[in-house]
Amino acid sequence: MKLTIRLALRDWDYMTPLVLGDVTSNRLDVRVDRVAALPDDLATSVEYDASEMSLSRYTTAWARGETGVFGVPNFIMRGFRHRCVITARDSRLTRLADLRGRRIGLAGWQDSGNTWTRAALEHDGVGIEDAHWIVGRLSPDHPSIDRVGRYARPGRIETLPGDPPILDLLLEGKLDAVFTPFMPDGFYGRDARYRHLVADLRAAERAYFAAVGYVPGIHVLGIKADLARQHPWLAQELSDLIDASQRLWHDKRCRYADTTPWIIDELGQCARDLPERWNASGLEANRRMVAAFIEQARHQGLMDTDITPDTLFPACTV
């Protein structure tokens, strides 16, 4: 009899084969819910047995001794972060290094993506102490919540009175750049009011990869720890299904490339610019990247522990 689990995922297109049942397991029946917002606390969720989750939240929770979620080093979301820095269309800034001494807006201080984006800035010579950081909601339809927490530092890392939307502040010239993983409405139109800050994204990201040797992991696969211990095979089986879904999606995308005029060129450039297994799962394939994230979390003051990649992603045992 198959074990049935309910899995929460963002609507990633490479999960389509898994959602449709094109990839299956003899041991596992995966019920996928495509969600706009991931569970706040998978360990206590009554709806889900597994979920994609923030690498930062998982790492800092594990560092605090909270072990209710078992992390699997399969990085559901990963990507370079240079593309996540945007500015106003008429800005003169074109490099991450140009942000030294500038005002930068972001919608969450501890977020995995923003942690990696700050790492990219530091790689180009802009550390936390070299900018003024405004943490707030991205747009008017986003809720006003505490997005900085204990990391607030007046004059350096702060929320403005009234929590004005940071995209509005950018257009008003009160911010020089904003971090966002998802582009604002209209961003890709000819009359867009925003643009990527970095003028040549591919060149900058290729250079970053050459320097660090990985594509940053943003979200990781999490499973309720008790369930993972009850079924020691579960973590690998679920990870393998996700990998199989991604491979099948990629093969079909290469075959049926006529979804946009130039996606076929993008597929070719990725194959030429990155190693074949740039997005491989497993701890060994990602050890360097995980170690770098842990070091950034320490360096940026998100945690202060002696956690290692092996303690963060232990082998699953009964």
Image (cartoon, helix red, strand yellow):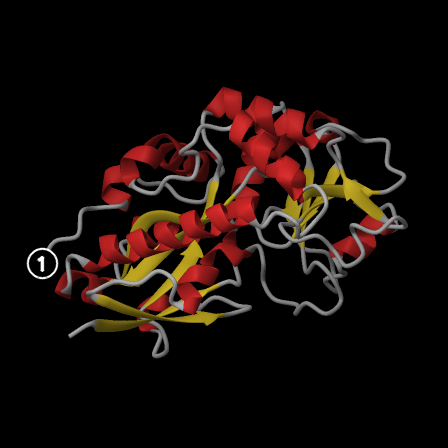
* For residue 288, above or below residue 219: above
Q: Position of residue 174 (x, y in %)?
A: 83, 47
59 relative position to 158: left or right: left
Q: Position of residue 164 (x, y in %)?
A: 76, 61
Residue 92 seen in this snapshot: yes
* Quarter occupied by residue 124: top right
Which residue is at the front of the view, 235 or 269? 269
Q: Residue at x 37, y 37 (%)?
A: 290
204 relative position to 75: left or right: right
- Which corner quadrant holds the C terminus? bottom left
How many marks do you count on the picture?
Answer: 1
- Which corner quadrant holds the N terminus? bottom left
Q: Position of residue 265 (x, y in %)?
A: 65, 35
Question: Residue placed farthest to the bottom in the image?
Answer: 46
Residue 110 seen in this snapshot: no
* For residue 195, above or below residue 141: above
Question: Residue placed farthest to the front in the image?
Answer: 255
> What amino acid is at disc 1?
Val
Q: Residue at x 75, y 35 (%)?
A: 102
Q: Residue at x 36, y 55 (%)?
A: 242
* Quarter occupied by residue 177: top right
Question: Residue placed farthest to the left in the image?
Answer: 318
Label 1 sits on residue:
318
- Secondary structure beneath disc 1? loop
Which residue is at the front of the view, 215 or 62? 215
* For residue 4, above or below residue 147: below
Which residue is at the front of the view, 60 or 53? 53
Question: Would you call the spot at circle 1 few (<14 residues within 10 Å), some (14-19), or many (20 or more)?
Answer: few
